[in-house]
Amino acid sequence: MSQNGRRLVGQNGALLRILALIDKVRDLSAPVLIVGESGTGKELIAREIHERGTRAGAAFVPVNCSAIPEPLLESELFGHARGAFTGAHRDKPGLLEEADGGTFFLDEVGDLAPALQAKLLRVLQEREIRRVGETRTRRVNVRFISATHKNLDREIEAGRFREDLLYRLKIIVVEVPPLRDRREDLGPLLRHFARLYGTELARPEVAFDPGALDLLGRYAWPGNVRELQNEVQRAVILCGDDGVIRPEHLSPRLNPEGGPAGGRTLGRFAEAKAEFVRRFLEQALLRCGNNKARAAEELGLSRQGLFKLLKKHRRAGSAGPSGR
């Protein structure tokens, strides 16, 4: 949990708007679709909606559509009758029945097979399910929340997703920004996970030294909050009894040189100046979502001028200037 008893950490404007939307929809039965990159916390938002609403006393049942093999998914969702297929030795309720009265969370719904999309559409329309191998229907009272990292409009254009199903799922849409677009939440998230894993390891006073904070702040976090969480957990384990996370405790993707901050300090003035310019450019690109045209405008440079600086100051082994 986090501040004020909620799971979602931070003060970014987009996050605060998500929390306000949760307050509006938590007691409703209307389906919610949560969209965002992998690792942004879509399931946390789904649980927040459930646990703050009138269905909190009933079950929250999550299922990852991409994690269960397609031949098994129908039986998992809808249940089956004894003898419906080889190995069905008894009647078994599905996950939708387990969620009766509560919330059913379909993660990665964009990976749902076409045949199951049709059956899910029927459930959303009729509020009824039929176990595999049965002819009778069963009523279910379920609140549907789904999530995806895919662009479902493009999936529809490609013929991989049903348009009528999307209309049913996206009565309410929650768009979750990537961590690179909510940089002001990096500090609160770092403190939150440091407390969480520090407490687990009896190190309640875990802290970050300036060198580690600098590396953490300059990293782009392509894996979003999940990647940040894993990085902090690893660092807390490695940091030792003094509870101070230093650059050498961070993974190679954040600290390629692997050494302490002192080992990276550039002694000569020209080298220190180049390091400052490099970091300054990287921060500008992070703020602008790697949009070089926008970064050039923010810095008062021409696009070509920015490209020249990036080429001059990029780190060894990094890609050359490209993109927008």
Image: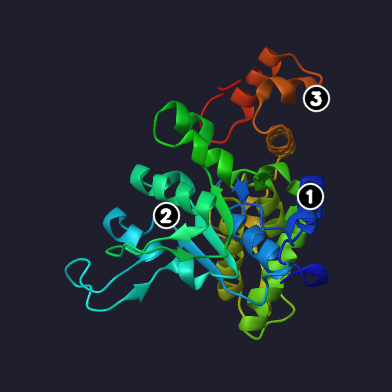
261 in relation to 14, above or below: below
- The residue that disc 1 covers is 184
Q: CA distance from mark 3 to mark 1?
A: 18 Å
135 in relation to 273, above or below: below
The amino acid sitting under disc 2 is Cys
- Which residue sits at x=57%, y=36%? 315
Q: Looking at the image, which is closer to me, 185 or 90?
A: 90
The amino acid sitting under disc 3 is Glu
- The residue that disc 3 covers is 298
Q: Decide: marks 2, 1 in contact (CB < 8 A)?
A: no
Q: Looking at the image, which is closer to me, 29 or 264?
A: 29
Q: CA distance from mark 2 to mark 1?
A: 33 Å
Colour approach in the figure: rainbow
In this rendering, would 28 be left or right of 255? Answer: right
Measured as percent of width and height from the top left, residue 249 is found at: 58, 65
Q: Secondary structure at mark 2?
A: loop
Q: How busy is the neighbourhood of tag 3: few (under 14 within 10 Å), some, or many (20 plus)?
A: few
Q: Quadrant of residue 291?
A: top right
- The residue that disc 2 covers is 65
Measured as percent of width and height from the top left, residue 176 is found at: 66, 47
Among numbered discs 2 and 1, the one appearing first in the sequence: 2
Image quadrant containing the N terminus? bottom right
Q: How busy is the neighbourhood of tag 1: few (under 14 within 10 Å), some, or many (20 plus)?
A: some
- Which residue sits at x=74%, y=33%? 284
Q: Quadrant of residue 213?
A: bottom right
